[in-house]
Amino acid sequence: MGRGVKVAVIGGVFAVMVGGAGYGAYNVVSALDDGGGSGSSEAKSGPPSGDEVEETTEKFFTAWEKGDATTAASYTNNASIAGTLLTAYADEAHITGVEITPGTAAGTAVPFTVKAKVSYEGTTKPLTYKSKLTVVRGESSGRALVDWEPSVVHPDLKDGDTLVTAESATPQIQAVDRDGAVLTKEKYPSLGPVLAKLREKYGDKAGGTPGVELAVRHTVGDAPDTPLLTLTEGEPGKLKTTLSASVQAAAEKGVKRYGESSVVAVKPSTGEVLAVANNRADGFNAAFQGTVAPGSTMKIITAAMLIDNGVTSMNGPAPCPETATWQSQTFHNITTMKPNMSATLANTFMRSCNTGFIKLIDEKPLTDSSLTEEAQERFGLGQNNWQTGITSFDGKVPAVSGPDRAANAIGQGQVQMNPLNMASVTATAITGDFRQPYLVPFDLDDRKPATAKGLPQGTVDQLKQMMRLTATQGTAVNAMSGLGGDIGAKTGSAEVDGQTTSNSWFTGFRDDVAAAAMTEEGGHGGDAAGPIVADVLRVGG
């Protein structure tokens, strides 16, 4: 952000050495500077009393208000790191006139409100925010001390972050959709991280001029600065995106159905991304960067592999037994699925029979690498060369032997995808052409789109018809109910270690819109992720 601005890094090697705040960390810190005190044989033990909590926070707040970083830091259990950040608070962030009002303590936790002002080159703006701290007892000194976390200073600060007020490194952007409608994080909240990335990458190409901001600078990872307060408005540059405001609004509403959900919509005829939305507590853009098993939505690629290699066809045999064993591992279907030994591939696909696919993957000429080749050469996946305009993961379908070869075929094992990938898979399946998804025009920065040879027309015809059957007669019928036009879908669920329920997956199309969603809640794809996709297709299709 700033030009020639000194950055105070909070964390770094020293932070790694001492760890986070807390009792264990204080032993190391106290050995170096004792947090401002010293241990003794008469040191107190046990949780701090109410009086101690009040006294410690009062002294800490008073020193902070005075701008005495060293004294304030001495009332924490990590005086060296705290002192660096509190010093930067005044020197680099230019925050003065601090007034802190504590709230009612809940045990050793104390909420508080900060009112201050930020001044830079003759411009001053008020700053108000809420934070909280916890008082703990230093093990070696027995003193009641503020348990140090960067979030004490500001709730948006994490390890490795600092506050800086300066002229921004990149001008602000006014992102607009395909029809010129302005896109803001206030109106489309989950676009916040996307717009920040677009600004970071294209702010200097969009024709704007920089302003002055108070921002969180992230020195760990590649996250762009997080603006907190604008002191001087720059001139935003206009950046046209491929997004559709109406489809984005539907996506934002859709992901609110379930926590930890993500969805992407693309235009199959062009590869343009029409919407990207996430409902996640961590703010991670899982829609573009997620790396999780896609479950049975993977059967689109597996079915294409079977057809392209002449193993079977839409109306050819794909028996669905109760179980199937591949190299010592036994695979099952959902408990309510009845075996059908005379099933066609279309029937096995629309019912999402795992065993039907497992039974076919050892047929000649298939090898351990056949699924990988299909994914890479036909669907453009797994080669780390997509140029969407922001950071994205391109899918992973590794060539493997043993039980994971079978597991990969049904979207488990070592396969990794995200909604962007699966929306693209659906787009390729129904058009035959791989058109790499993108958010901003390629000529904006001379990016080169990834390419793949796509699918034979005969394969496309069969895949599209099987997806239609799934949407109208199979596992996706409830979710897709009520949608007009040319529709198709595929459901999926994926078991992920440590989760109490399966991830829910769903991908579908309606006319010239394809969408895919994933949620960590809800189990089967048609039950949770399905309605999210339907919300998007209802508006976009």
Image (cartoon, rainbow, N blue to C red):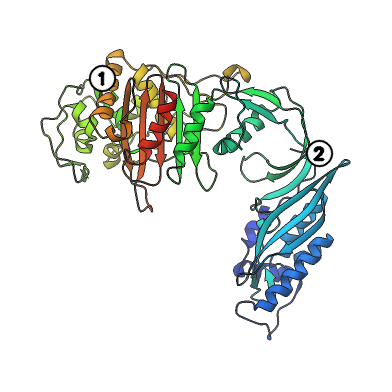
Q: Quadrant of residue 433?
A: top left
Q: Quadrant of residue 380?
A: top left
Task: Write down the residue under mark 2.
Answer: 4
Farthest residue to the left: give it: 342
Q: Residue at x 64, y 62 (%)?
A: 18
**Can residue 385 be seen at all in this image of the molecule?**
no
Percent of width and height locating residue 383: 45, 28
Q: Residue at x 72, y 22 (%)?
A: 207
Percent of width and height locating residue 122: 89, 41
Question: Helix or strand or loop: what does disc 2 sit on?
Answer: loop
Farthest residue to the top: give it: 457
Query: What amino acid is found at the position of numbered circle 1 in the picture?
Result: Gln
Farthest residue to the right: give it: 122
State whether residue 523 is above or below residue 25.
above
Query: What amino acid is found at the position of numbered circle 2 in the picture?
Result: Gly
Q: Quadrant of residue 447?
A: top right
- Work out how far the residue at label 1 is from the one at label 2, CA to CA, in angstroms: 60 Å
In the rendered view, does 518 fall on the left or right side of 239?
left
Farthest residue to the front: give it: 482
Percent of width and height locating residue 273: 50, 25
In the rendered view, does 393 fall on the left or right side of 100?
left
The numbered mark, 1 or 2, whose residue comes first in the sequence reads 2
Task: Write down the residue under mark 1.
Answer: 462
State whether residue 451 is above or below residue 384.
above
Residue 435 is tagged as none
Percent of width and height locating residue 535: 41, 32
Q: Residues within 10 Å of mark 2 (few under 14, many from 20)?
A: few
